[in-house]
Image (cartoon, helix red, strand yellow):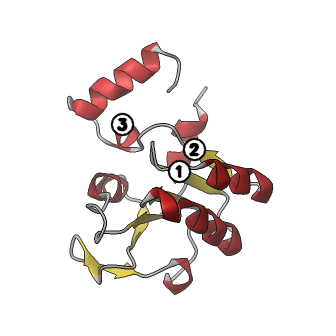
Amino acid sequence: MASNYETFFTLSSYAVVGRSQAKPFPLLSYRGLKAMGKTVYAIDPSANFIDGDVAYPGLAQLPGPVEGLIVEVPKAETRDWIAAAAAAGIRDVWVHMAHDTPEAIALAAEKGINLRTGTCAVMYLNPGLSYHSIHKLIMKMLGKY
């Protein structure tokens, strides 16, 4: 049976949120979803383009709805993105490990969002041998995959 983390990637459309001004955009997640054939939009309020694609400043500016959201922004912004996801009707959100906050987790629970946190989305997206595949192996051995 697939874990809650694995079922996140059965959705068909996603937005990936980053803030290039503060840290590099989460390109591995963005590219991984695109490689899977998913509809994926880049959201970055501090950039006009990500990886050659239009970057949108927020969820409200996307050309269509999305089912899943990956959030990898400074921790001070995480709760705001959970609130934006709830307002947009997004019920599946992944907050990159070490980017969650107690306030964001509580808001997600209050709004009925299926929140995935505490681990890295990339280990589910990139096949083959890499740092992320080693992370995946360790998480599987610990029963946290």
Q: Is residue 5 above or below residue 110?
A: above
Left or right for 119, reference 52:
right
In this figure, what is the number of numbered marks?
Answer: 3
Q: Residue at x 29, y 84 (%)?
A: 48
Residue at which label 2 appears: 116
CA distance for labels 2 and 3? 13 Å
| Local SS, label 3 | helix
Q: Residue at x 21, y 76 (%)?
A: 52
| Local SS, label 1 | strand
Left or right for 11, reference 87:
left
Task: Locate the N terminus by quadrant.
Answer: top right
Query: Do the CB atoms of the residues marked 2 and 1 lie less than 8 Å apart?
Result: yes
Residue at which label 3 appears: 123
Q: 119 or 21: which is nearer to us? A: 21
Q: Position of residue 110 (x, y in %)?
A: 79, 55
Q: 99 or 59: which is nearer to us? A: 99
Q: Position of residue 132 (x, y in %)?
A: 29, 34
Q: Residue at x 38, y 19 (%)?
A: 138
Amino acid at pointer 1 = Trp
Q: Residues within 10 Å of mark 2 (few under 14, many from 20)?
A: many
Q: Is residue 21 above or below residue 141?
A: below
CA distance for labels 2 and 1? 5 Å
Amino acid at pointer 3 = Met
Q: Is residue 8 above or below residue 138?
A: below
Q: Is residue 132 above or below residue 49?
A: above
Residue at which label 1 appears: 94
Mark 2 or mark 3, earlier in chain: 2
CA distance for labels 3 and 1? 13 Å
| Local SS, label 2 | strand
